[in-house]
Amino acid sequence: MNRRWTVSLGLLLLLPGCSLFRPHPRPEMAPPEEAARYKFPIALPTEGQQILSGPIAAAVSLAMEDFLPLGHTPPRDASPMELCALRRESYDVTAVPGSDDGVVFVSFSPRESACRDLQGPSRSDTPIVYAVDVGRSRILSVQK
């Protein structure tokens, strides 16, 4: 076996490993012409406003990315109920600082009004709870 063929074969075998280094999916951005038509208010309204501390927002973001990752594609044969259950807005989020410094508990529970009357397997009403170490940007445990 000549050296060039051996090197080529080695590189070919390493190619599937490159798929592990794909960039993280980012949220979809509206086209520039649509974005230009959107006008922000001079001041944000206070009605309905919810302020999240930085650690709480970070914990929710980390847990949500594990719970329903951006870029996840549903199976082709997914039922309407399954499609609804894969949307982030179908869940209410509760976040509570833990007694340990930097740990936040994040719970995802199905919204009562979401996915109602859709065909397909029913969703579990049991919340999923994450223990998130915000300082180290990692999930400590998941209770399902």
Image: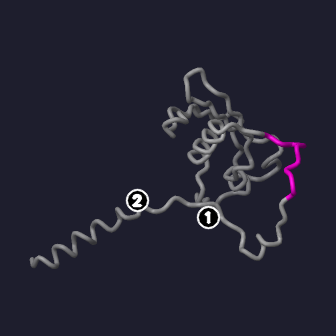
Q: Secondary structure at mark 2?
A: helix
Q: Position of residue 117 (x, y in %)?
A: 83, 49
Residue 76's label in the rendered image is: 1
Quick check: 66 left or right of 6? right
Residue at 25 percent of width and 70 percent of height: 11
For the N terminus, the quadrant is bottom left
Residue at 72 percent of width and 74 percent of height: 32
Dominant secondary-structure state across the stretch colored magenta = loop
Q: Position of residue 124 (x, y in %)?
A: 69, 38
Identify which amino acid the numbered label 1 is placed on.
Arg
Rendered image quadrant of residue 76: bottom right
Identify which amino acid the numbered label 2 is placed on.
Leu
Residue 20's label in the rendered image is: 2
* First to last magenta residue range: 41-50
Query: Does 53 lie within the magenta span?
Result: no
| Of the pair 139 and 6, the residue shown nearer to us | 139
Q: Whole-Å distance between the Cαs marked 1 and 2? A: 23 Å
Q: Position of residue 62 (x, y in %)?
A: 58, 43
Assess disc 1: are there few (<14), some (14-19) or many (≥20) residues with their C-alpha within 10 Å of its C-alpha. few
| Of the pair 68 and 45, the residue shown nearer to us | 45
